[in-house]
Image (tube, rainbow, N blue to C red):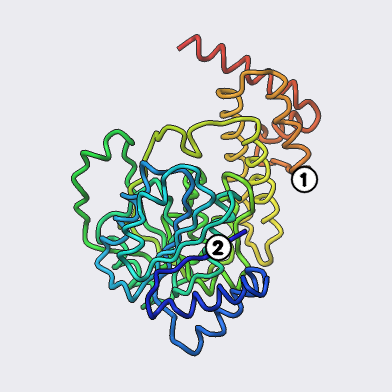
Amino acid sequence: MMVIRYKNTKKNKYHQIITMFCYKTKQNLEISHKLYNFVAKYINLNMKLSIIVPVYNVEKYIRPCIESIFKQGLDDADFEVIIVNDGSTDHSMEMIKDLINKHHNVLVINQENQSLSVARNNGVAIAKGEYILMPDSDDLLVDNSVKPLLEIALEKKVDIIVAEFLSINDNDIASFLGVVQEKFSYQEMTGEELLLELNPRQCYVWRALYKRSFIQDNHLSFIPGINYQDVPFTHECYLKAQHCIKTPWLLNIYRANRPLSGTSFFSLKKSISYCTAIASTWDLRKTKGISPQALYKLEEDVFISFKMMTYHTLHSIHKSSERKAVMSLLNATAPHLNFTHGFRQKITTFMIKRMPSLYIECYHLYAQIAYKMR
């Protein structure tokens, strides 16, 4: 069950009425979205920016994240913060209770644990900002970094604006003194041009602002229940975007090497997510109007994702039976996978299709020998 809570102010009274109506009449959340959108047209609830923060068991990190959102030089009336509590079992929400009560523009969705993907989707569904930003709850926004991005996005009406980030070790963040930004500069480009420059190892949704209408009009969403959902989402956005901006401006502070983070460990269970992300990204080859250059880049990116999954499998999964199971999952999830760029990719495709167990075990043996020879 999902419950939406709002600060008890005049501005949010309409949200409360809609939510309570839907609860009392046992309507689903989709109906409440429709009612909300209908009312919003007539009471001018539209705003410039929605910041969606999924929260799940991050009691040590969530407060600095939310505090950084309110250090952007933005008027509270111009943006909303949608905190999606994805069934946290620790004290995450208690850590920010006073911040929620302090700001009238904070909305909280409480739901059962359903994954980061579902939390983001539910946040997007009720967002009212012209643009959407989705920072991770264990990272930070650089002070006063959002305002210039939002201003140029609103002026140019771009589909996506992609910024840079600063990676800092988790243990060093407490002593971090801040960022001195260079003069703001940017480059306008198409989504395809963004794709051609994309580092496939950095498909981070949190480093970009997305026009809400662009997400809605193209029916873009995150695959429910999986990790690595940023990979297919980012590629699909870039393939469908027409007008974009890329800037070296620093937006995020990425908390690297955080214990127990979603990217800090790999398992057989996580390989299911990886396989789903690979299969979904590969299926984007069918995107209408995709150019030969974009198609080639997309296939290269999927191959890199496959190699990353193989690397994690070799270094994190110690049972031979589980390594073999990963390859079986890949073939079952992505049966049409076919790497053809060069001899190495063709051999890889042949091996994973015809001799998947032999492929992964030979690779594992090779990795062990290479490690010992260092």
Would you place residue 61 above or below residue 191 in this image?
above
Residue 189 shows in this picture: no
Identify the element where label 2 is drawn.
strand
Please state the horizontal and vertical placement of residue 126, each as a whole percent of the image: 53, 70
Please state the horizontal and vertical placement of residue 110, each as a whole percent of the image: 52, 58
Outermost residue on the right side: it is 354
Rounded to the nearest whole Å, what is the CA distance between mark 2 and mark 1?
40 Å
Q: Hey, what amino acid is under mark 1? A: His
Quadrant of the snapshot with the C terminus: top left
Q: Residue at x 49, y 61 (%)?
A: 193
Circle 2 residue:
3
Query: Badge 1: few (under 14), some or many (20 or more) residues near its Cα, within 10 Å?
Result: few
Residue 336 tag number? 1
Is residue 5 rendered to the left or right of residue 329?
left
Q: Hey, what amino acid is under mark 2? A: Val
Which of these two is toward me, 85 or 217? Answer: 85
Report the label total. 2
Is residue 260 rendered to the left or right of residue 363?
left
Is residue 90 rendered to the left or right of residue 87?
left
Would you place residue 141 above or below residue 359 in this image?
below
Please state the horizontal and vertical placement of residue 313, each as a whole percent of the image: 61, 27
Would you place residue 264 above or below residue 56 in this image?
above
Q: Earlier in the sequence, mark 2 or mark 1?
A: 2
Q: Residue at x 34, y 55 (%)?
A: 66
Q: Residue at x 76, y 32 (%)?
A: 328
